[in-house]
Structure formats: structure tokens, C-alpha cells
Amino acid sequence: MKLKKKIIIITSSRAEYGLLRLLLKKISLSKKLKYHLSITGTHLSKFHGNTIREILKDKLKISSKLKTLDNKRDDNISISKSFSMGVEKYSKLYKKVKPQLILVLGDKYEIFSSVVAASLSRIPIAHIHGGEETIGAIDNAIRHSITKMSHIHFTSTFKHRKRVIQMGENPKFTF
């Protein structure tokens, strides 16, 4: 019997979970992939609405919960603290779970911390929604950094695919 590939899928907010939802359901039924759903960010924050309830409602198995947010603050110091806690906690999770791939979507700093930890752990990263632009926001720097650390890219349009390739990413791994 061939072993299933272990993949960690990370979600940190209601917005990206909504985009990942159908993919998560498909992966959960796969005979080739063993998924580990890791939730973090606003999913676990009372201040931000405890959006974990949406995942529980969908009856998806949550494998790990990594709390990194300060429930009451969104200032630069709190974000930096949350980011560093995310890197540390995801590094420990990856060492324990030993995944073959990390799958992330978007441009949030909570996702960025999980990608930094995966990159330092030499774990391949698949990124959804690279190449997009948010004018005047920190999101661009975070999203493009995630793109540069990723190995497989799933963009939402041909324009975004072109941008990812212009950033130096391999067209063979940009979809």
C-alpha cells in the first residue's frame, strides 16, 4: 500500500477559509493525501469573532490550533509579537508532524509566519492567490514574500500568473 502524502493546510481568517473551503473538503476525501488542518489567527480570537465556528459547522477535522493573536490589540507591537509566536509555534508543529507540503492562501501576517517557519524547515510550500496587488497596503510585501518562498503557485488569473513568473518563479510550477 502506498503511503499518503502528508499536507498541512493553514487557515487564519474567515475570508481565506471561505476560499479554501471546497478545496479542503476535496482534500479530506483524497486517497492520496493525508491532510492536517491547522487553524490560527482570527479563527481563535474572541475579539475577532471566533470564526472557528464556521469550520466546526462544516465538520472538517481540525488537527491543530495555534493561538498567536493578542485578543484585544492590532497595533504594530502586537502584530510583531504574534508573528514571532507564529514562527516559533509552526516550527514546532512541522517538526512534530513532518509534512511533505504546506498549503496556504493569501497575504496575512499569520500565514506569513507559518511560511517563514516552513521555509526555514525546508518544507515545500504551495501558495494560492500570489501575484495579486493591494495598492498602498502592507499586504503586497507579505504576499510577494510568501510567493518568493513558495514552490508551487496557484494564481486566480492569467495576469497574476504572469506577475508571479515576472518575479522569477518557475512557469512549470505556476498555475
Image (spheres, rainbow, N blue to C red):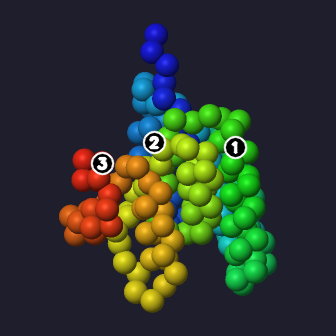
Q: Which tag, 2 or 3, sits closer to the chain's start?
A: 2
Q: Is residue 72 above or below residue 30?
A: below
| Local secondary structure at mark 3 | helix
Which residue in the protein does label 2 denote?
25
Which residue in the protein does label 1 denote?
93
Tell me the crowding category of disc 3: few under 14, some 14 to 19, or many 20 or more residues within 10 angstroms, Cα based.
Answer: few
The answer to which image quadrant residue 136 occupies is bottom left
| Local secondary structure at mark 1 | helix
Identify residue type, mark 2: Lys
* Horizontal relation, residue 57 to residue 83: left or right: left
Query: Marks 1 and 3: in contact by CB < 8 Å?
Result: no
Label 3 and label 1: CA atoms lie apart by 26 Å
* Horizontal relation, residue 80 to residue 110: left or right: right
x, y percentage for residue 92? 73, 45
x, y percentage for residue 3? 49, 19
Q: Total of numbered circles in the picture?
A: 3
The answer to which image quadrant residue 160 occupies is bottom left
Label 1 and label 2: CA atoms lie apart by 22 Å
Which residue in the protein does label 3 denote?
173
